[in-house]
Image: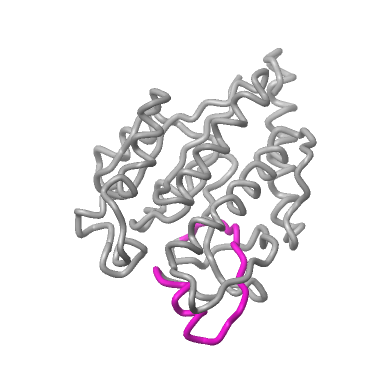
Amino acid sequence: MSLRIALFCSHYRGVALLDAALSLQQEFKDAGIVICGVATDDPTKPWTSPHKRIWRYPHTESEETMVAQLAQKHDIPVWRGRINTQDFYEEFTKRWTPDVCYMGVFGQKIPEAIWSSPLYGFYNFHTCAGRVWPSNAGGGPIETMMADGEKQGAVAMHAVDNDWDHGELVAFSDFFSFSPQESVTDVHKRIGPLAAEMMKWHVSKILGVSMPESKPRFVAEEAIAAVNATAHDVSLTKKRLGMPGF
């Protein structure tokens, strides 16, 4: 039995998430963690809304493709086209078949048929002020916070639903500081690991194992209780069927 993880991500946060998932594979080899697919931005295409998001800031061609290249290096299937299509639905439900999905810096809205499918849920990592939720929805939260005079922010891990940056809060990361003198891209480079650590923490909850990393600054305990209950139910089912556990 394996835990199948799909990622919807790009830019530096995407690299941090994919690196973390690869490290989880090595750390928990007995869990049979599989990175079953990576969907990533192609900012040359209008459906990723590049003019509204991180891609409107100066960047290099290698930054556009670095997630895809890292995935391909590890023989992980990559999708850079539209996801709201029958072709992707077939890929997702018949070949990827993920148990859990994580998203960060991804420019397409996730259809309900996709976000409602994984057993353990579909989660996004969104930058915000980190005090209330929802907050700072949209493609330019860091720039918005700078304009509002904020001096610090956080990464919110939340469930994906039919609205942008809106679903049930799972956790807030530790606060990070920034200043108007720092570029938005530089902030993104620094905070990718915050999302990656929360993803690793969440996977550890699904697997029922402890990890040396501390848990996020704020955790919505009811959201984690739901994950734990799902993991418990799956474990009991496998036990009844005589299947190996995680």
The colour scheme used to paint the residues is one colour
The residue most toward the front is: 181
Image quarter of the N terminus = top right
Quarter location, residue 221 = bottom right
- The residue located at (44%, 69%) in the rendering is 183
Percent position of residue 10, x then y:
39, 49
Percent position of residue 204, x then y:
71, 38
Quarter location, residue 159 = bottom right
As rendered, which of 225 and 157 lies closer to the eye? 157
Percent position of residue 24, x then y:
62, 31
The residue most toward the left is: 45
The stretch in magenta equals 139-161
As rendered, which of 228 and 134 lies closer to the eye? 134
Q: Is residue 181 above or below residue 48?
A: below
Q: Is residue 156 magenta?
A: yes
Q: Is 29 placed left or right of 69 in the picture? A: right
Q: Is residue 133 magenta?
A: no
As rendered, which of 202 and 15 lies closer to the eye? 15
Image quarter of the C terminus = top right
